[in-house]
Image (cartoon, grey):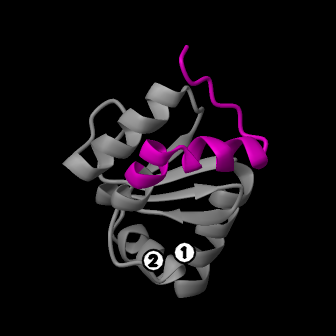
Amino acid sequence: MANSINDRIQGEIGQNPVMLYMKGTPLFPQCGFSARVVQILTHMGVPFESANVLEDGELREGIKEFSQWPTIPQLYVKGEFVGGCDIVTEMFQNGELETMLAEKGVGAKTGA
């Protein structure tokens, strides 16, 4: 079973330039940390896909093992783990998130 969830995660982060594993959905986040990351990405105009870990217990545990990161949400850009809410927030505030997205060719529309 571990292989199938790892394959699923690998597929999702490989197919989607920006992938967010979160509690809830972008329209109805189920925790403040997930809501904050959605808010940042939306503010920046970054298109992203998401997966609701609350709908799938195997995914909820599998993503933590996959990234070796204990908390949700988790943001991936171009297959690379960026971090959780605190890291994404800090990167947004100091401009690193916008720089990283630009370097990876992900279109952000900051200021739009």
SS for tag 1? Answer: helix
Q: Is residue 104 magenta?
A: yes
Question: Are circles 2 and 1 on residues that touch, CB within 8 Å?
Answer: yes
Asked which quadrant contains residue 79, the reply is bottom right
Q: Which residue is mark 2?
A: 62
Quarter residue 95 falls in: top right
In space, the residues marked 2 and 1 are separated at their CA atoms by 6 Å
Res 70 label:
none
Q: Residues within 10 Å of mark 1 (few under 14, many from 20)?
A: some
- Depth check: 97 or 6 in front? 97
Q: Please tell me the numbered disc located at residue 5.
A: 1
Rendered view: 29 above or below 81: above
Q: Is residue 110 above or below residue 28?
A: above
Identify the magenta region.
Answer: 89-112
Other-residue count near label 2 (Cα within 10 Å), few / some / many at <14 / 14–19 / ≥20? many
Q: Is residue 84 inside the magenta stretch? A: no
Identify which residue is drawn at 65% across, 59% down: 13
